[in-house]
Amino acid sequence: MAKVRLATVWLSGCSGCHMSFLDQDEKLLELAGEIELVYSPIADVKNFPENVDITLVEGAVGNEEQLELLKRIRKNTKILVALGDCAVNGNVTALRNSLNNSVEEVLKKAYVENATLKQNTPTHVPRLLKKALALNEAVKVDFYVPGCPPSANLINYVLNELLEGRTPALEGRFKYG
Amino acid sequence: MKPDELRNLAQKEDELRKSYRYRINVCCSSGCMPFGALKVLSAFKDAVKESGVEEECYVARTGCIGTCSIAPAVLVEPGDYLYQNVTPEKAKEIVKEHIVNNRPVKSMLYGNEAYFKKQLRIVLRNAGKIDPLRIEDYIAVGGYYALLKALTRMTPEGVIEEVALSGLKGRGGAGFLTGLKWRYVARATGSPKYVIANLDEGDPGVFANRTLAEADPHAIIEGMTIAAYAVGASKGYIYVRSEYPLAVETLKKAIEAAKSMGLLGEKIFETAFSFDIELRLGAGAFVAGEETAILASIEGRRAMPRPRPPYPAQSGLWGKPTLINNVETLANIPVILLKGSEWFSSIGTKNCTGTKCFSLTGKVNNPGLIEVPMGITLREVVFEIGGGVPPGRRFKAVQVGGPSGGFLPEQLLDLPIDYESLTKAGAIMGSGGIVVLDDTSCMVDTAKFFTEFCVDESCGKCTPCRAGLYKLYKILDGFTQGEGDIQDLDKVEDLCEFIKEASLCGLGQTAPNPTLTTLKYFRDEYVSHIVEKKCPAGKCFKDGGGAGS
Amino acid sequence: MSKTVELTIDGKKVAAKEGDNILKVARENNIYIPALCYLEGVSSLGGCRVCVVEIRGSPKVFASCVTPVAEGMEVITDSERLRRYRKWAIELLLAERPHVCSVCVANGNCELQQLATELGVDHLRVDRKWTNYELDLTHERFAYDPNRCILCTRCIRVCDEVEGVHAIDLMLRGKNSKVIFDLDDKWGFAESCTSCGKCSAVCPVGALYVKGKPLSEVKKKELVSFVMSRRSEKTIG
């Protein structure tokens, strides 16, 4: 039987969800028998591949580059899983949305007002979206695993259910924050 | 006032009326005022004086005649000659020709007989024919006789029985049997009891209650007083919108007049029954028309609805048994007592007796205030009374029931107007607003518009109405700007069901109607917005519509 | 003496005091109905609509916290429809203001968060609204973040009915509703506030809280029972 092609993606988030993913510890070894990691911050792959079975996406969609990547992910993935609060609902990443929705205001606040050194806004980076988006505000999402971060056990449960071809039952199992 | 005094006054007034050969009724309601009705009124008075026919012709300042499309409207009796768009100059001409020379000015008459043919005026029986500020005018046409009859010849239970037999249902929208409601209040323990007349008509484009109060305030007062006698109440409140200054002023003067004649106050008609009425002004919240919100408002609190039970009949104002009726319901009462329940129940349909006032507006040739027997079809209302949509336009939908009424398409126009049929089709009787839409209207945009109204008017107490309606509005707004996908329609229906079923009061429970009915009957327009990014009516998308916008 | 009525809740026969609401009776009989704005000891609001139940014979749903029990009533506390409605209620509350659990003082002690878990609200189907109300830190002991308020009015009711002060109320309406102190004064300058802390004790979320302490240290439930015991002392006294 061919291995399930798994990808994990890190958008605008703190990488905590990936840490939690790695916290599956010895269970990762069990997973390794069933999956092939085809794209991940911990794998050296430049472009998001085609024909991916499951993609775990951490982080909210913060800039144009991420939006484009997410759309490609959606196109190339059978099951897209929003991993963690930022991906599920924006979380901390989206706190900037309260700032009157002005990108300039956000940049000023972060890089000028609250900076002690080199007070100027960055230029050679992808342009921020007007609002940080939860994944389902941009593309269709198949499953949601909330948590900041979601526990390693929960991630492991969801992955195993998906590998078994079942729908994970989240009621009572997750916790926002 | 003694019973004899009422009879004498009526007789005297009747004789006075008969001593005039002509009576010119100049509509001075809120619909005709902006078109210069008061100038027309004084022009008539001057012309009558100048022509020396003061002895023969009486000029009356009246309430609404019902034909708002021909403002200012003037009705000359006898013969009910209705003049349209009267100006001070035309007034002179009418006096000269019609009154002096006895030749009605045909060119100025409103020739539209179809507008009146299918109407039946019970609630608006005196509208446009009496001076609302003269209580004598009301008495001359039989006013306060029903009260006299009730107080002197009927027991409270007898009054309730008569109202129950008539089959009258609450005209505020929900259609609860009036007789039954009265019986609940009559049987409730607690003292004092209160009667509240609901005149908080907050729906945009609806003006039936306002017009009634401006044209015939005593019908409301008399109906209320009879209700108070029937249920054993001693104090009444008329809860009226402060946005209705003319209605407020008219009611205030009418209450004063009734008090000064002893028709309100202590020992009315020398019986043991005493009743007093106070006006209470609402402060602009649509939801304040909900009955438990009225209670809160009159008690001086935030006009927020509360769950029922307890119903106001058990625990209303300050915890006392309280009867709350719409003013249109109350205006029916005097007629029912005078003409009998059998007569009343012969009008309309078996399950839905009597008439209903509607404010007919929108893309229709003859907008105005109409009163029709229950059971009349929407087609008759829109196409015969309303005269159909303007030339060159195609009928698209009719909204019945105010901002939270559903939109019904052409194929449902033969639906009879009664509470059950309308509710089944997804519309409501509601406050009696009928808005006609033609092919220039976009149904998605229209649903969005009325949802936005309800978002603004939600009191904020319960989650479905406060948060749910706002999200519904945002989704609809997205549709009109090319956002969303086709699966969102299922989500919208699911959200609407939650708002409808789980909201605390009638506002939330009916607010999804415009969305649900447009989704049901005009789904293709949603699909066109979402899939093709096109607005068939050319209303939506910022640059005026079209693909790729 | 009030009468006793018999009813069934999920098929279980229970006896109840006439006039009591369904939610209270269910809890007394160890039958769980999720609820949010309800607070035992103060009047019921019927606002959040999380505690909806079905009653056999009626097509409608009823907020159990404001529906009195009746003889022979058959209450159903769980069904596909009820679960769907409860989910919507929680989802809409989560989307109404920026509830960001990871940076909230109530994280781990929040009734909204807990209900989301319990009812399986693992994502939001509607856009979130990112309100930007000013944080009120003017009171020396307490803080108020309107961005986390779910308008359950527990604070208003406890201040009015238990403390007897009514320093808190709502202003504006609909989606603009806001809990305010006195006439929209800053908390620290609200003269009628007695600084008793009951409002922050009963706040189900992190909108009203004691400064400088995470809620894990100030277990809300214990405070609530403390408030309620004071109430019964008052009633007896």
Image (cartoon, grey):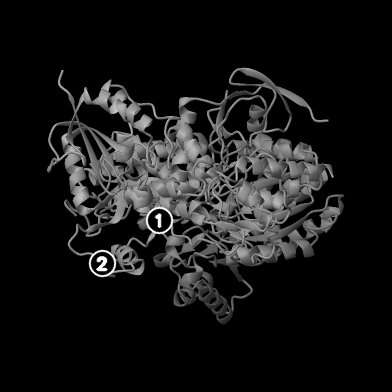
Find residue B501 and report its horizontal and vertical position in percent: 50, 36
Tell me the element at label 1: loop
Residue situated furthest bottom in the rendering: B50
Q: Judge whether B250 appears above or below B53 on screen.
A: above
Q: Is residue B250 above or below residue B314?
A: below
Q: In the image, what residue occupies the spot 48% across and 65% down? A: B73
Residue C106, x across and y down, in percent: 52, 46
Which residue corresponds to mark 1? B366
Task: Check residue C34 in the rendering and tell me which mark sits there, or answer none.
Answer: none
What percent of the width, then of the height, locates residue B483? 27, 48
The residue under the point 59% across, 59% down is C180
Is residue B6 positioned above or below B91 on the image?
above
| Mark 2 chain | A
Label 2 environment density (alpha carbons within 10 Å; few <14, some 14–19, many ≥20)? some
Q: Is residue B27 left or right of residue B495?
A: right
Image mark 1: chain: B
The answer to whether residue B330 is seen in the rendering is no
| Farthest-out residue, front | A26
- Which label was assigned to residue A121? 2
